[in-house]
Image (cartoon, rainbow, N blue to C red):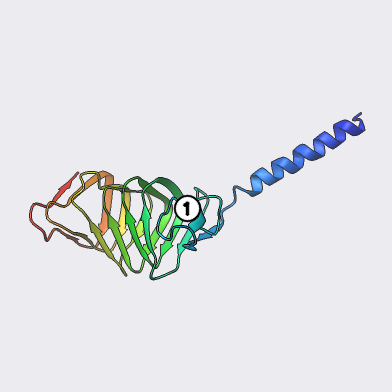
Amino acid sequence: MMNRTGMTCAVVITLLLTLAVTNTYAQTVTWTGQGDGSSWSDAENWSSTPNLPGPADHVLIDDESATVVHDDVTAIQSLICDGHLTVLGGTLEVNQSASFSNSLHIDGGQLKGGVWDTTEAVATFSSDNSNRLIGVTVNGDLASSTTNARLNIEDGLTLNGTLTMGHSRTRVAF
């Protein structure tokens, strides 16, 4: 038989567990640009403030004029980007898919997992030796953006498009 204190504790524990499970469900997190206006890692730029987008989130950057710089280690479910995204260091990992309608630029960063759709965008990579595609599928074209451009491929790449190495001394390593 449970006394009143035991019953109260059981109810409180049940509520806390319910809240913890509820917070792990996927939500859409939208770019607001109300922080510094450019840094992915500034929580004030996201509708989820004070939190950054996380592993359960679907991320939406629906401002075509936004220029977002990612320089952190981030895992998300999916990304729809109508603006300009530069992966300037760190790793951006998607579990499902990422699609772009403007531009994606890799400049010392890593794209990991998922399907990356660049059919409506310009996708480029720079001369930084840290540029990596890790176990990704790219639907669309990739192009070097500068002389001495570098791109390292790890854990396979499925490219459903064209890889253009139009600048001198561009290197792709597998």
At x 44% / y 58%, what residue is drawn? 36
Residue closer to the observer: 117 or 35: 35
In the visual, does 106 lie left or right of 17? left
Q: Is mark 1 on a helix, strand or loop?
A: strand
Residue 17, x across and y down, in percent? 70, 41
In the visual, does 21 lie left or right of 36? right
Q: Quadrant of the C terminus?
A: top left
**Residue at the farthest front position:** 36
At x 65% / y 45%, what residue is drawn? 21
Residue 121, x across and y down, in percent? 30, 67
Vertical comparison of 13 with 37: above or below: above
Vertical comparison of 79 with 62: above or below: above
- Specify few, some or many for label 1: CA neighbours under 10 Å numbering under 14, 14-19, or 20 or more: many
- Quadrant of res 159: bottom left
Q: Mark 1 points at which residue?
A: 77
**Residue at the farthest top position:** 1
Residue 90, x across and y down, in percent? 35, 45
**Residue at the farthest left position:** 168
At x 7% / y 56%, what residue is drawn? 168
Q: Quadrant of the N terminus?
A: top right
Q: Give the amino acid type for the residue marked by disc 1 in the picture.
A: Gln
In the visual, does 81 lie left or right of 21? left
At x 32% / y 54%, what residue is drawn? 137
Residue 19, x across and y down, in percent? 69, 46
In the visual, does 122 lie left or right of 93? left
Counting the numbered discs, the total is 1
